[in-house]
Amino acid sequence: MYEEEMPKKKNKKKTTKNKENRFIREGKKQNEKKEETIINEETQVEVDVEKTKPVVLEEKEETDQVEDKEQKEAKETKIVKEKTTKKMIGIKTDWVSVLVKLGIFLLVAFFIIFAVTKIKNAFSGNSFTKNMEKMKEVAYIYYKVESHRPALIDEEVSMSLQSMIDATLIKELKDEKKNVCNKDYSYVSLVKTGAETYDLNVYLSCGGKSERGTYEVTYKEETETDPNPEPNEEEKPSTTPNQKITLYELSRVLATSYNYTCPSGYILAGKSCVKLNQTVIKDATPIYQITPEKNTSAVFKKSGSEYIYADPILVENKDNYVCPKGYDLVGTKCVITRDANVKKNVSYTCPNGGTPEGSKCLFTTYSTYNDQVPYCKQGSLVNGDECYVTKEPSVKCINGTKDSNRNACYTTYTASKELSDWLFDGKVTYSGSKVLNDTDTVMYEIDEELENGSIRYRKYIRKYVKVCDGDDDLVGSICKHYDKAYEERYCSGEYDMNSDKTACYTYKDADYRNVKGPTCPQGYTKKGSGNNITCYKYENAVKQETNNYYCTGKYDLTADNKCVYSIDATLKNEDNYTCPDGYTQKGTGKNTSCYKKTTTESYYYCSNTSATLSGNRCIIPEKTEFKGYRCPSGYTLTGTKCVDDNATERINATKSQSVSSETQTIWSRTSNVTGWTWTGRTKEV
């Protein structure tokens, strides 16, 4: 509030400069006006001289008609002398004008320098005194709340500058040298001195300088009411001459005197009773420091993965077997299990007959002796003398676009982005104190704990890739969806459609060619000569692959194709620890820790344990702390008591009202006034 009232440094300079410019402009205007006035006056003098000249001459001519010629010449000579004298006066007037201008300029310059100095001093000011005033005003307003003020006489409450800043009652304070004022040592306090009176103490420390001030303040418990209040504008009656006003008679009883008495041994002193040279012991005044309520932003915890730890469960087990690092305990054995090595065995078979030869099947038959042999220029020979000819059906798209290369129809849509499967990205090592948080794209798994306290992790990543639905083809960022439902297949001409609509077919007569000697069936090749001619052909054999699992070194192969090596576990008679269900165990014995990985939702929380979460804000309640005890001047603090061995004991005298009293009456424009009673009488005026 108070910081906003102070102009910023840049604005201060700008304002000063503007004011300087304004003074200069005004000074220039005043100089110009005064110069113009002087010039006008000088001009007017010359004009008056010129105007006076003919008038004087005319008058002289009329009066001197009877004079002789010598007297006229004397008069004319006198006029010429007067004119010369006035011209000399004009020359002197020019020097006076210059001196006047110079004086005005110096006067304006003096005013400008004086104004700039005043403005600079007004803006610089005494920052220390202003800061004291800020603290006093803020404290005065804060202690207006009754619950913030001390309840007992001589009781004191205090509040540090840091607490005032935390409660946003005031901003950070700096002195004129830009030193930040001490937030812990600087404070305000309030001491109750009477029913409605208090001492407001302000202490400020900035840059090695400190200052203390005490101010008497009053906080009214009840608002006093004027016994004869003035009505507001709406209630004021009209005061026109013919309108009457109704007045009400009010009364109250006033006591005229009071009697004051003292107990035995005390002397009456005004309204108090005193006893001299007494040892007075009174309770010391407790001093409390009040820290105002603080409203801060809550901490936002984003959703993600985190590890939850649980205490391991102690299992008393004397037969406790342990294994070296890298081994798993199985019963009383320490076992290392690895995947077996694999060697591929490849073999070929001929399910349709024939003799296997490498990756081929050999078929042989006898040759025949024919003069003419049927053959097909297109298709394959069937039924002895026919050719079965096929071709791909023609396609017409009833939906989508035709792909001529595939002879199919497709529609397109934009590929979507999805995270890929987890991909192994290598191993990383971090200090054991480092906390790694998994995200949607990065995940860590503990691989090994090193002897130097570091931990090696297996790092996995996921990348965003473009994907299509099902088996659709991805082309750049577009997906092509082929669907036979989009197609209309047909055969033209002499071709017919086969039953599964995969081909068009027709039968054509085979052609014949003349041959000499033995011939082989179509697809076979002749081998040999003369009477030893045979026919043969090769077809691809069916490839079969089998895995041959094996282990090396000291490892043994198991039935499930694993390589296992085992040694006897070491028996240690010590306590064993296990983890609750769902938790992963790390370490053994007293070094056992249990953890599990969970996915959390985003939430707000307060780092201060005494704060209460309210939405996204943390409310730290007002706190009152006992700081010690204080005694009045002249008393010595002993424990919780204040002792004065040479004191004047003072107590309030007993007040009693005298019998005599009087009744006071007034006339009021309203019948309802606090502390007064309407007698029932009225009058009009």
Image (spheres, grey):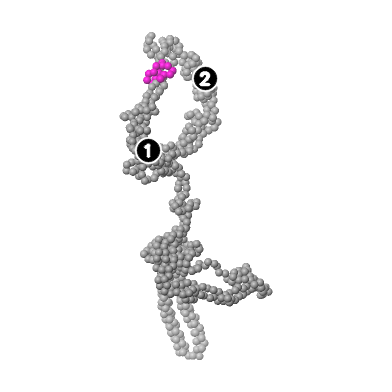
Question: Residue most toward the front?
Answer: 264
* Residue 425 in picture, x, y percent from top left: 38, 38
* Residue 438 in picture, x, y percent from top left: 42, 42
What residue does disc 2 label?
506
- SS assignment at label 1: loop
In the foreground, 391 or 52: 391
- SS assignment at label 2: strand
Crowding at mark 1 (Cα within 10 Å: few <14, some 14-19, many 20+): few
Q: Which residues are magenta?
A: 349-363
Q: Is residue 2 magenta?
A: no
What residue does disc 1 label?
317
In the foreground, 43 or 572: 572
Question: Residue most toward the left?
Answer: 553
Pointers 1 and 2 in contact (C-beta within 8 Å): no
Q: Is residue 353 magenta?
A: yes
Q: Earlier in the sequence, mark 1 or mark 2?
A: 1
| Residue type of the residue flagged with mark 2 | Thr
- Residue 309, by quadrant, is top left
| Residue type of the residue flagged with mark 1 | Asn
* Residue 27 in picture, x, y percent from top left: 44, 71
In the foreground, 193 or 16: 193
CA–CA distance in space, label 1 to label 2: 85 Å
Locate the C terminus and report the quarter of the image it occupies: bottom right
Q: Name the residue at 42% across, 81% down.
A: 88
**Residue 74 sits above or below residue 91 on the image:** below
**Residue 267 sits above or below residue 610 on the image:** below
- Residue 113, by quadrant, is bottom left
**Residue 100 sits above or below residue 614 on the image:** below
Q: Is residue 251 left or right of residue 91?
A: right
Residue 585 in view, yes or no: no
Q: Name the residue at 45% across, 53% down.
A: 610
* Residue 6 in picture, x, y percent from top left: 45, 64
